[in-house]
Amino acid sequence: MSKSPEVKLVNVPSPNFVPEKDLGKPLVLEAAHLGIDFGGLVAVDEFNIGIGATEICGLIGPNGAGKTTIFNLLTKVYEPTRGTIMLGGKDTHNMTPSQVNQMGIARTFQNIRLFDKLTVEENVKIGLHNHIGYHTLAGVFRLPNYWKEEKKAHEKALELLDIFGMADLANVTADSLPYGAQRRLEIVRALATGPKLLLLDEPAAGMNPSETEELMNNIRKIRDEFQIAVLLIEHDMNLVMGICESIVVLNFGRIIAKGTPSQIQGNPQVIEAYLGTHRG
Amino acid sequence: MKIFEKASTASKKAFLNYGIVILFFVIFQTLVSTGNISSALKGQLIPIACYMIMAISLNLVVGISGELSLGHAGFMSVGAFTAVIVSSSMTNSSDVSSLIVSIIVAAVIAAVAGFLIGIPVLRLNGDYLAIVTLAFGEIIKNILNCLYVGIDEKGVHFAFNNPAALAMSATGKVIINGPMGAVGIRKISTFIAATILLLIILIVIQNLVNSRTGRAIMAIRDNRIAAESMGLSPMKYKMLAFTVSAAMAGAAGAVYALNYSTLVPKKFDFNTSILVLVFVVLGGIGNMTGSIIAAGVLVVLPELLRKFSDYRMLVYAIVLILVMLVTNNEKLKGKIDTFFKKLRMKLSKGGRK
């Protein structure tokens, strides 16, 4: 596995830190004292995170720690019970998932959610939806604007698919793709919405080691090419330790450790959460 | 030919549908002009075209938007009675202009009804949505049952439950008489007009489906949560599909109503909604070609079976069951598909000679 060089993390004027290269640029995401209760159950509490403009951040933790719940909070599938989420410096209180997407946050899903009956290209074009500039009536009457914008969207979709080498699958329906390709398509589709922050929920699940290696390279490539931040949930420690610049460890809905990969690997609390305490 | 090869499969399908509609028109128009058609079937031509419009417009909601609506006949009746009022108040205009204006006004009023009903209905999902649309269909029917409309030199008068409340002058004429329905309708619908309307609506639907908006509607159908996280607003696009569909049903209702001299609100009850839904389901959900053919066959079939009088509804039911069995049987479907593939290969070989 090819490892990224370890970066230095520096404090910003808040309880968070970002990679040194992102210092001076505004944080793409900042969540403070975030929490949600389901009935009497405190699912997430006191979640604080700051993500730099081009940071790759990992969110790890044992099963049921609340990682996906945090993704659902950040994308406003759930409205948080406590705390604030600032996206590009703006509070997302009472916004809908579609509004925060247009503000620059896009995600993939743990259990794949593609538009099954549509083709691969159409799936990507739905990601491009808010960047295709013609009115419904222009579509119905096939005005020149329709042809121009559709052609642009078609080219853009193929270009994005090409990042993952999927351009030749453009006319296949999404549900007939193999599992790994469906995961990759989800990333392309999220990328098509033009995000500043990409949330990946277990992108390597079900992939073999060589596919995982390729995925790592692609995530780095996306970050460098589009200059965006990535927050990812993953159980594959090779991937997490290989590409993440900072890691947040979650257990029972609370952050138990934050830091660089090497700091996390040596953290006794993290080892305890994953392996349990030594008795006797 | 080269252009045709270049065209995408979606636009090929679209042109196939236009071809079917034009063929349908040409065949029946020649039958009518050569006098080789029974008068009963001749009287059914405009209703057939209207039912085809109803089927494809309902398919927009059921197939493309993925919501089961059981009140489609309600929007048809809104359009029908609007058209009766508009055409009666335009007695000085020519038939063609009266018809066009009636259709447009009917579509607009039906769209407004669709929008207002859509606000509560589209907050629901699945079975609940179906039940509430059913209820709204019945509500529309019952409102029209109580509606009295009269016309005199001062203009159009409306009243509820009481024809005396119309307060018209001596020369006034009642055009909608509560449960007795509309009387003395101007019969200005023509088969050509109905076919042109069908073509226009088919073009609008297919262009809508193959555009940015159509993709958004289908994305919300396939996975609402993913669509929302891609920046689409589900309510907006569901409402668009529902309203457009209602407007089209209204236009179909206008052409339908202006083909008869009298029309009662009872005509547009739950059974009519189900009949249209049967066209959609039988023709294949989301399949416009299927909807058109199913609507045509299922309206003509009872007429053709008239000879068997007592048994005709029995045969009708058996045909429906058989079609369901055949279209849902993978083995049979496969055999039919291979048969058509072979046929196509033979034809293309023959074509090369």
Image (cartoon, helix red, strand yellow):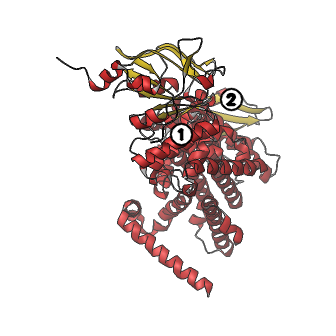
Q: Crowdedness of circle 1 by 10 Å Cα count: few (<14), some, many (20+)?
A: some
Query: Which residue has dot 1 on it?
Result: A219
Under tag 1, what secondary structure? helix
Residue at the location (73% across, 30% down)? B168
Residue B54 in sight here? no
Q: Nearer the viewer, residue A191 or B51?
A: A191
Residue B342 screen position, x and y as percent: 48, 78
Residue A126 screen position, x and y as percent: 59, 43
> Can you say which quadrant of the picture contains the N terminus of chain B?
bottom right
Query: Which residue has dot 2 on it?
Result: B166
Residue at the farthest bottom position:
B353
Q: Is residue A45 left or right of residue B257?
A: left
**As shown in the figure, which amino acid type bears the numbered disc 2?**
Leu
Q: Nearer the viewer, residue B82 or A13?
A: A13
Residue at the location (35% across, 22% down)? A270
Q: Chain of mark 1?
A: A
